[in-house]
Amino acid sequence: VVVERFRAELAVAPLLKGEVHIIHMTVERPSVVLDIAELAVPAGSLGKSRLPLELDKISLDAVEIVEGEALVSDGRTGRQWNVDAVNAIVSLRSLFGPGRIEGGMLIDGERLSVRTILGRSEAGQMPLSVTVTPVESQVSVTAEGALRVAAGEPLIYEGTFAIARENRPPAPGEQPKPPENASTLSTLGVDGTFRLTRDRLALPQVRVSYGPPERPMQMAGEAGVGFGPGA
């Protein structure tokens, strides 16, 4: 990780107790290079810090990320994704959670809004809820579950998901859409269960419904997407 500049405001009193309470921090133009094929927790590192502090004693009221960027790649296939214009606010009661992250970014030119809620990490699992909404779309994707974090093992995220239409209020000066001009996605819903690893996104249960809530047409099945060579 490379950061162009950062500023931080710390509370003094917690330092006397061996705690770090960051009131506000601004991180400008951070740049990250990430290979998803190598996503794993280093052996023997779980819960440890290089700082002379316990991670549970570091809290963040508000960390503002300004114009961040990342190059995300998959070393197994050579695929790359450019993530730009990352602007977000991060708040954490401790580095073990709970906390939240809200902001937006561009992925290969498509602007996304992202909201993440983290629970407290316990016994190698962290409750995690993520909602991603393409700004130019009226559809949001929400995943709720637990991120499994085990030393020396790849990360695993599993739980439930839902794809639904966003009922956004009209912007100032914009006229609301009449019902007849509403998107055909307004009565489409998709939900189910998932298991995400660096190798595969498995959807053991998928349910698609379309039509009025009282009498929708429904289909059910399973699906999966591989990320490795030959996928």
Image (cartoon, rainbow, N blue to C red):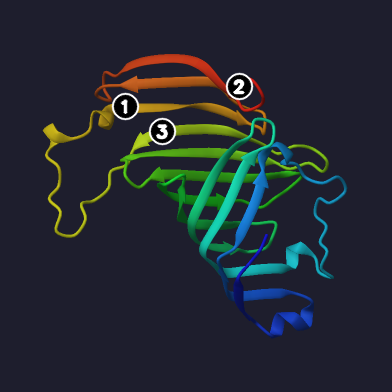
Q: Which x, y percent locates residue 26?
A: 56, 72
Helix, strand or loop for disc 1: strand
Helix, strand or loop for disc 2: loop
Q: Which residue is mark 1?
A: 188
121 left or right of 62?
right
Q: Quadrant of residue 53?
A: bottom right
Please name whichever residue, 201 or 218, is drawn nearer the observer in this view of the structure: 201
Q: Residue at x 12, y 50 (%)?
A: 175
Q: Please identify, in this view, whether the residue under mark 2 or under mark 1 is nearer the observer.
A: 2
Q: CA distance from mark 2 to mark 3?
A: 24 Å
Q: CA distance from mark 3 to mark 1?
A: 9 Å
Q: Which x, y percent locates residue 109?
A: 42, 47
Residue projecting furthest to the right: 44
Q: CA distance from mark 2 to mark 1?
A: 28 Å
Specify the amino acid type for callout 3.
Ile
Q: Which x, y percent locates residue 160?
A: 53, 32
Please name whichever residue, 20 or 196, is drawn nearer the observer in this view of the structure: 196
Q: Residue at x 23, y 28 (%)?
A: 184
Q: Earlier in the sequence, mark 3 or mark 1?
A: 3
Specify the amino acid type for callout 1.
Leu
What mark, if any, has residue 163 been given in the picture?
3
Helix, strand or loop for disc 3: strand
144 left or right of 112?
right
Specify the amino acid type for callout 2.
Ala
Q: Residue at x 14, y 42 (%)?
A: 177
Q: Is residue 30 above or below residue 42?
A: below
Q: Which residue is mark 2?
A: 231
